[in-house]
Structures are given as C-alpha cells and as structure tokens.
Image (spheres, helix red, strand yellow):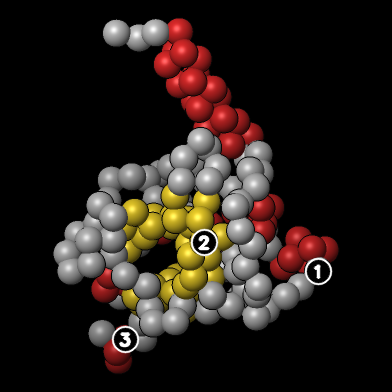
Amino acid sequence: MLDRRTLLTGSAALAALGAQYWFGKEIAMATTVEAEVQKPDAEWRKLLTPAQYDVLRKHGTERPGSSPLNQEKRKGTFACAGCDLPLFSSDTKYESNTGWPSFYQPLPNAVGTTVDKSLFMTRTEVHCRRCAGHLGHVFDDGPKPTGLRYCMNGVALKFTPASPAAT
C-alpha cells in the first residue's frame, strides 16, 4: 500500500531525474578526479559540441536511443570525444536494450570510476582516465565474462573503424 511519504519521496526522485533528463541540469558528483589532460573551461567549450560539453564536462546524460553509436556494428575502437584516448573495443560492445551504447569491458588503463550520489541513489560513474570526462555509469547486470554493463553516453565517444587489413 502506498503511503504519503513513499508517494512524496518517489515523486521527488522522479522530478529530479526528469529535470536532468529533459533539461540537462548538472547535478554535482560526490568526488572530483585529477585529470592528466587539463584545459580551461573556455577551451573545452570550443573543442566540444554543446552536447559533448554537457555530458563530458557537466556530467549530463543524452536522451536514450539518440546516439548513432547504438547501431554501430563494425569492428573498431570507441575513443573519448574529449581527448581521443581509446576506451572500448567493438569486440566488447553488446545490445543492452537500455538506449545507450553498452560494453562489458573497457580497454586496459582507459577509464576510472568515482562514486556518484546524484538522483537520490549511489552509482558508479565512469570517466576517461586521461581527461576525466564523464562517460556514463557501470552496473553489475552485464553479460559474461565480466558481468558488467558499461552504459556510456554515445556523444562522449568517437568511433574509429578498424582498417580493412585488420578485420
């Protein structure tokens, strides 16, 4: 049975999620990351599209199903849109039916994680190891062999197809 407290708590959580989803509002992360590649904010704004800036620098989230990378099936590498660091091999990409590109494993020494306590929950944020750009989150409901689902914002990634000789 729903009581008033449960209804109000649920409504507040949905309102916060809706604000971030629809309006791209930044919600502060619990920790910060020291980046190897550092640029002034004005330089990031010039380098990135507004959508990339919102996700990579302000921890935004793209709308589910909006990334062309969801349909990307070719062999290749997914790199950080901010600093070009290779992050994921196409060999680890899979269809999670979440609306975002998903992988079960990053490349070695490619990503870092922090605690994200936004939206009234605790999640594990995934960021680029080199520029600390926000990529998405990792969950423990993925496929074998890792059991992990790296749920990434496609706008935070660039895809480079493998050369024909490599396939």
Tell me the distance, in whole angstroms, between the alpha carbons under discs 1 and 2. 22 Å
Task: Name the amino acid type tagged 3.
Answer: Pro
User: In terms of depth relative to the viewer, which is nearer, 48 or 68?
Assistant: 48
- Is the residue marked by circle 3 packed among few (<14), some (14-19), or many (20+) residues within 10 Å? few
- Is the residue marked by circle 1 packed among few (<14), some (14-19), or many (20+) residues within 10 Å? few
Q: Which residue is mark 2?
A: 114
Quarter that holds the C terminus: bottom left
Task: Name the amino acid type tagged 2.
Answer: Thr
Q: Is residue 63 visible?
A: yes
Q: Which residue is mark 3?
A: 164
Sequence-wise, which precedes: disc 3 or disc 1?
1
Q: Residue furthest left?
A: 144
Q: Are marks 3 and 1 in contact (CB under 8 Å)?
A: no
Residue 70 lies left or right of residue 55; in this view the side is: left
Q: Is residue 46 visible?
A: no
Which mark, residue 66? none
Q: Which residue is mark 1?
A: 40
Q: Quadrant of residue 64?
A: top left
* SS assignment at label 1: loop
